[in-house]
Each structure stands twice: as structure tokens, then as C-alpha cells.
């Protein structure tokens, strides 16, 4: 995985989503999920392009069941967008880089 993408766990999830001033986009995924694997290079591009204005993170649904249940993740991949320490949007399914950038612009005014 790209070093610009943070791996979240039950232990560090709250610190990342609550104590960082940048917007955070989190991908919920699993090793066995084919669409999740397709999504990896897209997220890596987003992490690289927006590294100064956005935190990109991943949560493995199999090893972080507590977080997965808390946010009612029922399908993967699912993206959660946090701004000012609050969940502001979610999207399920693989989407293109262009579609992610539209979400970033809409919710974070990042271009």
C-alpha cells in the first residue's frame, strides 16, 4: 500500500478522524474483495495528488469490526468523508478518480 495512505485500526481511528485539521477520506475494504482491489490505484493517485490538503486512509472491515459496525458499513468498498471532525458524506461502490474529485470539490472545496 502507498505510504501516503494511513492504515486505520480500532486503536487509531478516533485520533485520525478527530485530531487532524485536514479533511479525511476513508476507504472501507477487505483482502477478499475484488472491487476493493480495483479501487487501490485510484486511491493512491488521490493520496498523492492531494497529500497537502487531504488525509487518505483505509479500514480493513475484517480486522476492524468495531468501526465497521459503528458506521454501518454493509458493502465494500465504501468511502466515508470527514470534515471538521464530523462524518459528512459516504459513497458505496467503486467510483472513478474523477468522481472522487467531484466529491472532494463538493464537500471540501478541494480542486
Image: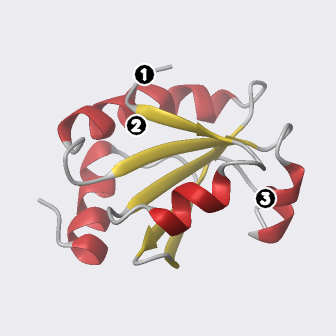
Residue beneath disc 3:
67
Q: Which comes before the other along the chain, label 1 or label 2?
A: 1
Say which quarter of the image contains residue 97: top left
Mark 1, residue position: 2
Mark 3 Cα shell of 10 Å, populated few (<14), some (14-19), many (≥20): many
| Residue drawn at (42%, 21%) of the image | 2
| The C terminus lies in quadrant | bottom left
Q: Residue furthest left?
A: 111
Give the label on residue 43, or none. Answer: 2
Numbered disc 2: secondary structure: helix
Secondary structure of the residue carrying tag 1 is loop
Do the residues bearing badges 3 and 2 touch, measured as CB atoms within 8 Å?
Answer: no
Q: Who's the residue at 53% across and 55% down the image?
A: 16
Mark 3–mark 2 distance (CA, rounded to whole Å):
20 Å
Q: Residue at x 51, y 19 (%)?
A: 1
The numbered mark, 1 or 3, whose residue comes first in the sequence reads 1
Assess disc 1: are there few (<14), some (14-19) or many (≥20) residues with their C-alpha within 10 Å of its C-alpha. few
Give the image location of residue 21, x and y in percent: 34, 66
Amino acid at each position: 500500500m502507498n505510504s501516503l495512505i494511513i492504515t486505520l485500526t480500532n486503536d487509531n481511528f478516533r485520533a485520525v478522524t478527530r485530531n487532524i485539521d485536514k479533511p479525511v477520506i476513508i476507504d472501507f475494504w477487505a483482502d477478499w474483495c475484488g472491487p476493493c482491489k480495483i479501487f487501490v490505484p485510484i486511491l493512491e493517485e488521490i493520496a498523492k495528488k492531494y497529500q497537502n490538503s487531504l488525509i487518505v486512509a483505509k479500514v480493513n472491515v475484517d480486522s476492524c469490526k468495531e468501526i465497521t459496525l459503528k458506521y454501518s458499513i454493509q458493502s465494500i468498498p465504501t468511502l466515508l468523508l470527514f470534515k471538521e471532525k464530523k462524518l459528512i458524506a459516504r459513497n458505496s461502490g467503486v467510483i472513478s478518480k474523477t468522481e472522487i474529485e467531484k466529491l472532494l470539490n463538493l464537500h471540501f472545496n478541494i480542486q
